[in-house]
Image: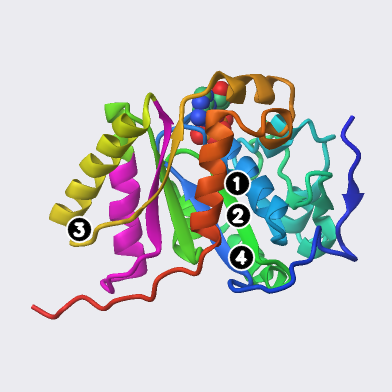
């Protein structure tokens, strides 16, 4: 069993210099099963290995499964926070991988229809807790329900995960479109695209171009490509063993690609640029 300790007294690791204090990064996709949870975990681990203080928040309020992918013992953490029984910082646990986790309870489904006011309280607490970290990663659920949209709009940065499958592309576009509507008419660079399970880098690049073209044409903004993660059987194997890919297979293709993504996500976000008035 993975050994875990409460993270309340000390964040996982300290960095010498922090350029992006407390940035909240959400991972969304619309379509399910494209690798959001695995990516959030592995990205968090990569950032922690680079010396960043990271909190991973299981924002899949319906079918939390960060705990399952990491083999965490069941805990009441997120449910207790949402019920107001526990402070958010007290509920976080330190993972041996060097990052903190606020895990949900897989399969409970009980948190799916969290009241809007409760969600706002949790997000406010998360914003406060974020000041103790360099990056807070929110693993969002599939679909585009109210709480997914709210968490995506709340984040300082949104990683939209797409794969080469046409349904994934249309769903990723829907995420971009609703996010643009939710954050208002100011053009900004909050949303970026990550292509996962790419058959080759070139194919991943084409997938990005397709999505970026639709976004440019219909939404008037071109989200940057933050990373292309290649399809790699080591991912499945690491998940099956409930272990961290960067520990088991640190130089496999997907690991190398996530390290590159971590470098892009760890860099300061470009400033928002207002749209010219028509
Ligand atoms: N780069 C990759 N190469 C190969 N397989 C991958 C890769 N990324 C993810 N997968 C596979 O995709 C599966 C789904 O991953 P994961 O559960 O993280 O997706 P998800 O988007 O969080 O799903 P959900 O929408 O249900 O929450 C994993 O079990 C893994 O086997
Ligand atoms: Mg998931």
Number of residues whose C-alpha sits closer than 10 Å to that of mark 1, classed few (under 14), some (14–19) or many (20 or more):
many
Label 2–label 1 contact, CB within 8 A: yes
Labels 1, 3: front one:
1
Residue assigned mark 3: 219
Is the CB–ligand 1 distance for label 1 below 8 Å? no
Residue assigned mark 2: 137
- Answer with mark 2 or mark 3, whichever residue precedes in sequence: 2
Report the front residue among 156 and 99: 99
Report the front residue among 232 and 124: 232
Number of residues whose C-alpha sits closer than 10 Å to that of mark 3, classed few (under 14), some (14–19) or many (20 or more):
some
- Judge whether residue 191 is colored magenta: yes
Label 4–label 2 contact, CB within 8 A: no
Which segment is the magenta one? 172-198
Q: Position of residue 80 (x, y in %)?
A: 79, 53
Residue at 20% x, 58% y is 219
Residue 40 visible, this angle: yes
Number of residues whose C-alpha sits closer than 10 Å to that of mark 2, classed few (under 14), some (14–19) or many (20 or more):
many
- Answer with mark 4 or mark 2, whichever residue precedes in sequence: 4
Above or below — where is 217 with respect to 97? below
Q: Which mark is residue 43?
A: 1
């Amino acid at each position: 069993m993975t050994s875990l300790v409460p993270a309340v007294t000390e964040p996982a690791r300290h960095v010498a210099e922090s350029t992006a204090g407390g940035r909240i990064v959400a991972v969304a996709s619309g379509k399910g099963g494209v690798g959001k949870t695995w990516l959030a975990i592995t990205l968090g681990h990569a950032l922690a290995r680079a010396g960043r203080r990271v909190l991973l928040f299981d924002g899949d309020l319906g079918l939390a499964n960060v705990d399952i992918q990491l083999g965490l013992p069941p805990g009441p953490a997120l449910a207790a926070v949402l019920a107001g029984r526990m402070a958010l910082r007290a509920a976080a646990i330190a993972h041996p991988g060097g990052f903190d986790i606020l895990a949900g309870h897989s399969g409970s489904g009980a948190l799916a229809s969290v009241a809007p006011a409760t969600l706002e309280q949790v997000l406010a607490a998360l914003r406060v807790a974020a000041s103790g970290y360099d990056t807070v990663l929110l693993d969002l659920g599939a679909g585009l329900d109210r709480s997914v949209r709210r968490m995506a709009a709340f984040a300082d940065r949104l990683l939209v995960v797409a794969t080469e499958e046409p349904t994934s592309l249309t769903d990723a576009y829907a995420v971009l479109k609703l996010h643009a509507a939710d954050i208002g008419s100011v053009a900004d660079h909050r949303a970026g695209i990550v292509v996962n399970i790419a058959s080759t880098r070139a194919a991943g690049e084409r997938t990005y171009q397709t999505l970026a073209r639709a976004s440019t044409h219909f939404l008037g903004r071109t989200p940057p490509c933050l990373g292309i993660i290649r399809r790699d059987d080591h991912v499945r194997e690491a998940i099956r063993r409930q272990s961290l890919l960067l520990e088991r297979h640190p130089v496999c293709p997907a690991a190398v690609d996530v390290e590159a993504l971590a470098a892009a996500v760890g860099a300061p976000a470009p400033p928002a640029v207002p749209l010219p008035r028509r």
